[in-house]
Amino acid sequence: MIFEELEDFEHRSKEGKLSYHERLRSVIHLIHILQSSDSIMKLLSFYPAFKKDKMFSQIKRKIDDFWELIMNNIAHQPENDFLNEILSNLRIPETDSKNVN
């Protein structure tokens, strides 16, 4: 389902059917999906049973392919500040110096 959403976004983006804000929102949403999926795969990689499974490497490769697809899509946007807008809208937790050991 995740991969279908990514492929649909790529297709609609290439057709030029999305406004600037729709593209921005979609890319941020897809980045969050990929981050979550990638994190789950990293956790599962510590369990030999999952890591040995044939599907594990296929899913991991597909996630890597979609990271590349998103980055290529961002790089080819007509707006020069598209990447900056994405970075400024991503929820990156601030680290408080009190929380650092």
Image (cartoon, rainbow, N blue to C red):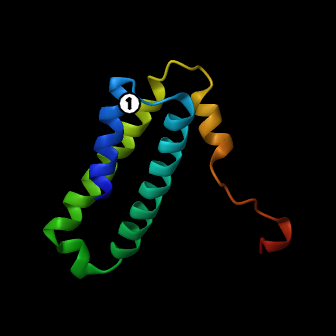
Q: Is 45 placed left or right of 58 in the picture?
A: right
Q: How many marks?
A: 1
Quarter of the image for residue 24 reads: top right
Above or below, 39 against 76 in this view is: below
Residue 60's spot in the image, x, y percent?
A: 28, 58
Up-down relation of residue 89 to residue 36 (above or below):
above
For image coordinates 36% across by 77% down, the residue present is: 46
Q: In the image, is 97 to the left or to the right of 3?
A: right
* Residue wearing tag 1: 13
Q: Is residue 100 above or below residue 12?
A: below
Residue 23, above or below 16: below
Residue at x-position 77% and y-position 75%: 101
Residue nearest the observer in this picture, 35 or 9: 9
Q: Secondary structure at mark 1?
A: helix
Q: Position of residue 68 (x, y in %)?
A: 36, 39
Q: Amino acid at mark 1?
A: Ser
**Residue 33 picture quarter:** bottom left
